[in-house]
Image: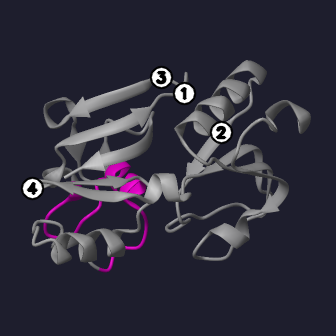
Amino acid sequence: MKEEILNIKGVIKYNELLLKHTTFRIGGPAKVFVTPHDESDLKKVLSFARSKGIKTFVIGRGSNLLVSDKGFDGIVIRIIEPYFCDMRIDGTTLTAGAGVSLSKLVVFACQNSLGGLEGLVGIPGTAGGALVMNAGYESMIGDRVKKVRAIDKEGKVKTFSSKSLKFGYRKSNLSEYIITEVGF
C-alpha cells in the first residue's frame, strides 16, 4: 500500500497513533494517516481508498473524538493543511477552509466587522466538523451558511447552496461528504 499512494504532496504516515491527533489524547494506530496538501491530494487518497476497498475516516483537529485503543484499520484523513485553513472576505461573505479552528473563525469575523458567528465561541473543532454536526449554543452554525464546497467519496466536488442544506440538532445532510470550504 505504501508505494501506491506516495504520489501526493501531503504527509503519509503508517501506524500513526491517533492519540497524537485527538484532544482527549486517546486512540490507537491508524493503518494509514494522511494529511493531504490540497484538494488534488484529497481526491487521490479517496480514489486510492475506493479502488482498494479501504475505509476512510476524516478528522480536523480531533476534538470530540473518542478513538478506540485498537485504532482504525483504514486511512485517516486529517484536513488541517494551510490550503484547508484559508479565510477571506468578499463583501459580507466570509469564506473559510474546513480546517479553520472555530476560535480563529470567530476572531477573523470580528476583526472584519462581521457578526453572526459569536455562538461558536468556546467550541473546539474546525469549521468543517462543526458544520457536519451543526454545532452551536444559542444559534447553530448551519443558520449562517451561504454555501459549502465538499467532495464526495467518489472524489467529485460538489457545491451546495444554503437552500440545498438541511440542518437539525447536531446533524446535517453533509455527513457523507468531506467539507473543504464554507461560506458564511
Q: Secondary structure at mark 4?
A: loop
Kindly indicate whether the residue at mark 2 contacts the one at mark 3 (C-beta within 8 angstroms). Answer: no
In primary-sequence order, the first of circles 2 and 4 is 2
User: Is 86 drawn above or below residue 153 in the view shown?
Assistant: below
Q: Which residues are magenta?
A: 122-141
Q: Say which residue appears at 16% left-offset and 43% top-offset.
A: 146
Which residue in the protein does label 1 denote? 153
Cα separation, mark 3 vs mark 1, equals: 7 Å
Q: Amino acid at mark 2?
A: Thr
Q: Amino acid at mark 1?
A: Lys
Which residue in the protein does label 2 denote? 56
Which residue in the protein does label 4 denote? 92
Which residue in the protein does label 3 denote? 156
Cα separation, mark 1 vs mark 2, equals: 9 Å
Cα separation, mark 3 vs mark 4, equals: 28 Å
Cα separation, mark 4 vs mark 1, equals: 31 Å
Q: Nearer the viewer, mark 4 or mark 1?
A: 4
Q: Say which residue appears at 41% left-offset and 63% top-offset.
A: 100
